[in-house]
Image (spheres, rainbow, N blue to C red):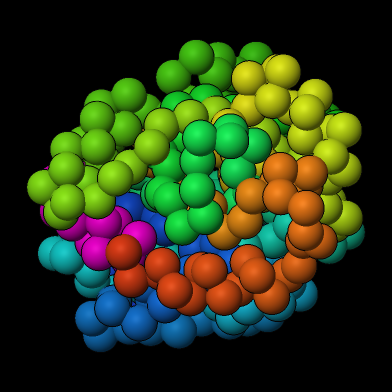
């Protein structure tokens, strides 16, 4: 396993000497933030040993390394999903790779559906906690001791001071930033109305098909984590309409700049 990570690290170092301190994962339709990175170095996933390629629509499938808001960053322009058929270990491989590269803080974004009926399409939400309904955990199997302990505490997986920082920056920018619990669902089918009612009873505010594995791995690695969701649709059954991938993409495109400005404002304060 170490040999795979060593080869992956070497492949990144062949392209850039920058040592990233912040990792950023961009969700569906949110890849535009990578366009703000200064002196970018583009590294396709296919060029990194051990890295799987993303097949999800709207995901470029490459790392972008450079400077953003005065911080050295490595950005995932497109992520891997469980529904694509990737193993959990492959989904979190890039998080562990970031750790090996020197990343201390992980910023995660996603597009998601609102379970909380007080939320609206286009809202932003800082994730305070999650519920894992994916039926799998990326830490299953032999423990990788070089990254973290066998039993990983998740009490502060979403770093409290980063959440408060995000709320403060949102206030300064005049952006309403909601707070809530994200429920991770395997997909790729959208949830049924009955499932959404059950998830609401469990305490979920939003639902999506990503983020949870990456945050678990980041917590295991000892990284600080900030996660922000863009609500692109109301979950099944809330509105009497069918859900569509295009709705997600369109809403993400319409609100992406607000999220990008927020993240760019947060980074110098980390």
* Image position of 102 (left or right of 82): left
Most extreme residue toward the front is: 240
Q: Nearer the viewer, residue 8 or 64?
A: 64
- Residue 195 visible in the shown view: yes
Q: How many marks?
A: 0
In the rendered image, the vertical position of residue 253 relative to residue 108, given as above or below: below
Q: Residue at x 51, y 68 (%)?
A: 252
Where residue 110 appears, x then y in whole percent? Answer: 54, 54
Q: Residue at x 50, y 14 (%)?
A: 155
In the rendered image, the vertical position of residue 101 relative to residue 28, given as above or below: above
Q: Residue at x 24, y 37 (%)?
A: 167
Q: Magenta-highlighted stretch: main secondary structure? A: helix
Q: Which residues are magenta?
A: 259-270
Where residue 73 appears, x then y in whole percent? Answer: 32, 63
Q: Nearer the viewer, residue 199 or 218?
A: 199
Question: Based on the displayed image, in which of its 4 quarters is residue 125 positioned?
Answer: top left
- Residue 48 visible in the shown view: no
* Image position of 246 (left or right of 216): right
Confirm whether the magenta stretch covers residue 64.
no
Q: Residue at x 48, y 76 (%)?
A: 253
Q: Nearer the viewer, residue 7 or 190?
A: 190
Q: Nearer the viewer, residue 149 or 106?
A: 106
Quarter placement of the C terminus = top left
Where residue 31 appears, x then y in whole percent? Answer: 48, 74
Confirm whether the magenta stretch covers residue 260.
yes
């Amino acid at each position: 396993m170490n040999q795979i990570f060593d080869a992956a690290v070497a492949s990144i170092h062949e392209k850039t000497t920058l040592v990233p301190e912040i990792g950023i994962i961009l969700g569906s339709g949110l890849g535009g933030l990578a366009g703000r990175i200064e002196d970018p170095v583009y590294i396709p996933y296919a060029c990194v040993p051990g890295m799987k390629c993303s097949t999800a629509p709207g995901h470029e499938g490459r790392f972008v390394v450079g400077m953003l808001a005065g911080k050295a960053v490595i950005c995932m322009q497109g992520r891997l999903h469980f529904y694509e058929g990737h193993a959990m270990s492959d989904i979190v491989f890039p998080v562990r790779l970031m750790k090996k590269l020197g990343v201390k803080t992980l910023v995660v974004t996603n597009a998601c559906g609102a379970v909380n009926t007080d939320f609206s399409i286009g809202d932003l939400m800082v994730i305070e906690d999650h519920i894992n309904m994916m039926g799998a955990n990326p830490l299953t199997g032999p423990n990788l001791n070089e990254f973290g302990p066998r039993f990983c505490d998740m009490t502060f997986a979403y770093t409290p001071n980063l959440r408060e920082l995000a709320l403060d920056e949102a206030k300064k920018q005049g952006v309403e930033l909601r707070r809530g619990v994200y429920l991770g669902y395997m997909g790729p089918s959208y949830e049924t109305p009955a499932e959404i009612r059950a998830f609401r009873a469990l305490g979920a505010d939003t639902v999506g098909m990503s983020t949870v594995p990456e945050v678990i791995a980041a917590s295991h690695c000892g990284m600080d984590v900030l996660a922000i969701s863009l609500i692109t649709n109301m979950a099944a059954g809330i509105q009497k309409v069918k859900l569509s991938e295009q709705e997600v993409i369109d809403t993400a495109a319409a609100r992406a700049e607000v999220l990008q400005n927020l993240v760019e404002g947060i980074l110098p304060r980390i």
